[in-house]
Amino acid sequence: MSSQDPKQRIDKLVEELAEASHRYYVLSQPTLSDAEYDRRFRELEHLEREYPQYSRPDSPTQRVGSSPRTGFKTIKHAVAMLSLDNAMNEEEIAEFDQQVRRFLEKEGQVEGEVEYCIEHKFDGVAVTLRYEAGLLTQALTRGDGFEGEEITANAKTLRSIPLRLRGAQVPPVLEVRGEVLFMKSDFEAYNAERVAGGEEPFANPRNAASGSLRQLDPRETAKRRLSFFAYGLGAIDGFELPALHNQVMEAVTRFGFRRSPLFAVVRGSSGIVAAYREAQLARAGLPFEVDGMVVKVNSLALQELLGFRQRSPRWAIATKFPAIEENTVLRDITVQVGRTGAVTPVAVLDPVQVGGVVVSRATLHNEDEIMRKDLRIGDTVVVRRQGDVIPAVVAVVTAARTGNERRFVFPTNCPECETKLIKPEGEAVARCPNTHCPARLEQHVLHYASRNGADIEGLGDKWVAMFIERGLVQDVADLYLLTEEQLLRLPRMGELLARKILAAIDKSKRVALNKFIFALGIRHVGERTALILARYCHTLERFRSLGLDSLSNIPEVGVETAAALSEFLSDPEQQALLDKLLAAGVQALALEEQQGGALQGKTFVLTGSLQSLSRDEAQERIQALGGKVTSNVSKKTDYVLVGAEPGSKYDKAKELGVCILDESAFLRMIS
Ligand code: IVH
C-alpha cells in the first residue's frame, strides 16, 4: 500500500483544521460547521493512530489529551515581563504625555505631539508564547515577571493560540505576548456548567481564567474555552522589527493571532483622552472584560530612548476605567437549595442600577464568604457588576453602620425538608443530604426538563412544585407516568393544558443521548461534557457501563468529572432510575440517529476482498453511518477501502491521491 497517501491526507487535514480554527477563533468568521470540523478531526485521529509516523506536532489532536501532571516547572523569561504604571483619570493621562514629551525634548527628539498606539488593557492572565522555527514550543505565565510557570500543554488547548505560526516566512525565534481570558459568553457558559454540576460559579472572569490556565490536567483547561489576545513581543531572533508598534502588531496578526479590537494610532494627550472616553462608552458592549486602555509610544526607536524605570516602561501607561460599582442596602439573606443539595446563601438587596442593569439579588456563595466580609443584614454594601457577569457583593461600608444590623445565622437544617445539613471537612458548601428533599427534587426535575436537557416545553416551576407537593412526582421518571386524570385534579388545570403538558412530556421520550446525559444532572457534567460522553459512547447502554478506567481515558474529561460519573454510575439507586426511565419509554438516541452518521456525506469505493467482513457487510456499515458506496474512483471519492488482491481501482486511487484505507484502518474508523 502506498505510504504517500495517508501522509498527504494527514497534512491536508492538519492544514484545513488549523485554517478553520483561525477563521473561527481569530477572525470570528467561521467557515466549517462544528459537525464538519468534528468529522475531519475524527478522521485525522484515526489516521494518526494508524500511521503514527506521520503525526505532526502542530496537529489539532495535540491540543488535548495529555495526561495530568503533578506540578508546574518554573522557567526564567528570556526577556522580563514588566508591569505598567497606571493613570486613573484624564489628568493623569495628560501628565503621562507631558513626561514623555519632556523626556524626548531633552533628547532633542520630538517637536510637537507624540504619536501613540492605543489598545485595550485586557483583564486576564499574561503569558508568553515561544515559537521556534514557527512551532509553539513553550508557554509561560508572567509569574513575578522574571520567571513564570511552564503551562505549554494547557496553552495548546486554546484554539486562538496557533500551534504553528501562519505564513511562509517564520523567524527562528519569536515570542508573542498577550493575555489569556474568558470571553463573557464562555465565562457564563462555564459558570452555568459549574452550577449544573453543583459547584459554585466563579465571581470574576480574571480569577477564573487564572485558575483555569493553571489546572494540572490540561483536559480541564480545554473544557473551559479560554481565549488569547496578543499585545506585543518578547525575545526574537531573525525577525526584523518594523519601525512602529502598530506595524509589529500587524505582523503578529499575520502570524495568526487576535489582537485588541480597539487598536488605533492617536496624537498627543487630546488624542488619548478622546479614545479613552470612547473606549469607556464601548466597554459594556465588548465580548470580554477590559479594565482600561493601554497607551504606547508608537515609535520603537523612541520607546528605546525612553527606556524603563524600575519595573515599568516610560513609554507606556495603563489608563484604568472606573469600576462599575454601586452602594445599596442588604435587606436580607436567604438560602437556596440546589439540585445537588448545595445550600447557598443569596443576598436580597434594595434594587440598584449597576452599569445599566437593575440588581436586586446576588449570590454570596457560602457561609465563609459572609464571615470573611463580615456581612450583616441591614448593612450598606458595595455591589459590583463586571460586564454581563453575575453581580457580587464586594464589601461592606462599615462607616454607614448604625448598630441596628444583625448577623446572619446559617441554618443547621435544610429550610425545605429540615434534614440536618452536612458540610464535609475542607468543603465550603453545606449540603442537604436527603436525596428526596423536595427542593432538590424540584431543581432536579426542572433541570431534567430544561431546554438543554430533555426539553419538556411548558413545564414551569409552578407545576413541578405542585406535582412534587402532591406526591405525583417522586423522581424524574414519574413524569412519564402522569395521567390526564391526575392532572385534571390540580387547581387551575384545564383539559387543554393537561393534554399539552402530557404531549410535551411524551415528546421528550425521544431525546438525544447528549441531552439525556446532561438532563441526568450528574455533578460536573455540563452540556459540553455530556456531548463528549455521547460521542464517546454512542449508546446509553455503553454509557451506563462505563467504569472509572475508561472514564479516565476520555479526552477532555477531567479527574473530578470522571470520579463524579463513576460514583453516579455505580450507584444502584441511579441505575434503577435509568431502568425506570427506559421502562417508561424513554429512548436516548445516538448522535448518528439524530443528524446522520459519522460518515455522513463521505463516498467510499471498495476493492479487493476483506477478511473480517464481506463486501456487502462493509457496504451496510458505511451506509448505516451515513456514507455512500459507489463503484468508480474519481476525485470526489473520499476513501478507497482496499482488501487483498485489489483491482485497478486501487491504482486509480493512488493516481488521484484519494485516501486509501486498509481493513484495519476502516474497522477503526467505523468502530
Ligand atoms: S504591554 C512592559 N499591552 O498589563 C509591559 N500589557 O501591568 C508591556 N496587559 O501583565 C505590557 N493588556 O499582561 C500590554 N494591551 C496590553 C495589555 C497589557 C493587558 C497586562 C500585561 C501586564 C500588565 C501590566
Image (cartoon, rainbow, N blue to C red):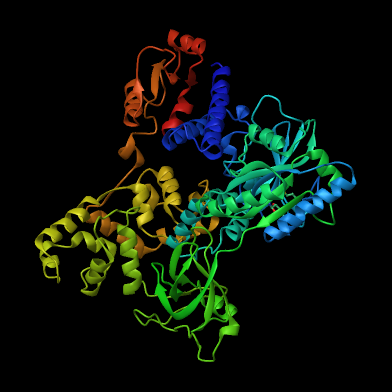
- Report the side of 562 relative to 614 (left or right): right
- Report the side of 343 relative to 204 (left or right): left
- Residue 400 against residue 585 in the figure, above or below: below
User: Measured from the top left, where is residue 543 in percent x and y?
Assistant: 39, 50
- Residue 490 against residue 157 in the figure, above or below: below
Residue that lies at the very extreme toward the right in this rendered image: 107
User: Measured from the top left, where is residue 216 in percent x and y?
Assistant: 63, 54
User: Measured from the top left, where is residue 24 in percent x and y?
Assistant: 51, 37
User: Measured from the top left, where is residue 444 in percent x and y?
Assistant: 34, 64
Measuring 31% from the left and 39% from the top, which residue is drawn there?
A: 594
Q: Which corner quadrant of the image does residue 95 belong to?
A: bottom right
Measuring 45% from the left and 57% from the top, which residue is drawn there?
A: 193
- Residue 430 against residue 502 in the figure, above or below: below
Quadrant for the C terminus, please: top left
Measuring 55% from the left and 75% from the top, which residue is drawn there?
A: 369
Frontmost residue, 317 versus 538 = 317
Measuring 67% from the left and 34% from the top, which residue is drawn there?
A: 250
